[in-house]
Image (cartoon, grey):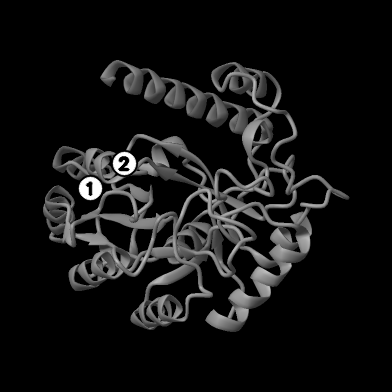
Amino acid sequence: MIWPSNKKFAFTVFDDTDRSTLDNAPQIYAFLNDLGFKTTKSVWPISGRGPALIPGDTCENKQYLKWVLDIQKQGFEIGLHNATYRSSSRNETIRAFDEFKAMFGHDPYTLANHASNEEAMYWGRARLSGPQAVAYDVLRGFPPRDRFRGHIENDALFWGDICRDRVRYVRNFVFRNINTLLHCPTLPYHDPDRPFVKLWFASSEGATADSFCDTIEEVHQESLEQQGGACIMYTHFGKGFVEDGKLDPRFRDLMTKLADRDGWFPTTVELLDYLQEQQPEQTLARKDIAKMERRWLLDSASRRIRGLLKK
C-alpha cells in the first residue's frame, strides 16, 4: 500500500463513547491534537429513557456538545455509537440521526454498535454465518438468538434502511494484531448477506487503557511500520485513560513515540475512504468472509482464555 505523502504506515482510533465525560475526554483529545493525531470520537446524540446501563455524557448536555463541536472544528471526526446508551426504538434512532445531522452538519460517516443495545445492527450471532454462528453460540454460552434486532424488518427496533441510507461504514470484527489489514486485507468490505450495511470495517483491540497500550507497544509499532500496514484502534477513552485528572503514563509515552514515527494519522473515515479508492472492488466472497469469521472466533477464544488465566 502506498500511503499519502509516502508515509510508511497509517494509524487512527475509533473511540466508543462509553464513560466519556467532560471530566476525562477533553484531556485525551487535547493530548492527541498536540501530537498531530486526528482520530474519531463517537457520540450518543440523545439521552435514553431511564438510567444508563453504561454511563457517559450525551449531546443533550450542552457543555459536552460544545466541546465535541470544538474538536470537530480541530479536525477530529465525530462518529455514532447508536442513538444513546440504552436500546432505542426505530423512532428514537431516526430522531438521533436527525439530531446528529443538525449538530454536526451531515449524517454520521462511521458507526460502531453499542454492544448492549438490542437495536445493534447485525450483532451477536447475526455477525456470523453457518458453523461460525454455532461456534459463537458455544463460545458465548448460547445467548438469546434474537436479542439484537436492528436488522430484522418489521421489528419495533428495525432501522436497517436508515443504516444503509445514512451511514457509510460500520465496525464489526476486532483483532489483537496492531495491523488491522493483516486480518482484514480488503478494508472496507461489503457483505452481500448483510445488505443493510454498505461497508464494514475491522479494528485492532484496545478496549481499555491496558489493552490499548499492549497493542501499541513499541515492538508492535515497529512491526506496523515495517509491514506498511494500517491500524484502526478500537477503544473507550473513558475506560482508564485518565485517572485522578492525569493521563495514563504508559499511554502518554507510547503515543508520543508513535507520533514520532513516519506515519499517516487520519480520521477513521479518511483512512477508509482512501482504502476504498485503492481497492474499488469491495464485495467479499462468502468463503473469504467465513475465513475472517473463523479468525475472529479464534482470536476471541484466545483473548477469553488469556483473561481467565490472568484471574
Per the rendering, the mark at residue 13 is none
The residue sitting at 47% across, 57% down in the picture is 275
Which quarter of the figure is the C terminus placed in? top left
Residue carrying label 2: 178
Q: Residues within 10 Å of mark 1 (few under 14, many from 20)?
A: many
Q: Nearer the viewer, residue 94 or 195?
A: 94
User: Looking at the picture, which amino acid does disc 2 mark?
Assistant: Ile
Label number found at residue 225: 1
How many residues crowd mark 2 within 10 Å: few (<14), some (14–19), many (20+)? Answer: many
Residue 109's place in the image compared with 261, above or below, is below
Residue in view at x 34 percent, y 42 percent: 179
Position above or below: 124 against 239: above
Secondary structure at badge 1 equals helix
Q: Position of residue 191 (x, y in %)?
A: 67, 43
Give the residue displayed 46% in from the left and 21% down from the top.
Answer: 298
Q: Nearer the viewer, residue 117 or 197?
A: 117
Is the residue 243 above or below the residue 284 in the image? below
Q: Name the spot of residue 141 as percent of width and height, x first.
A: 59, 19
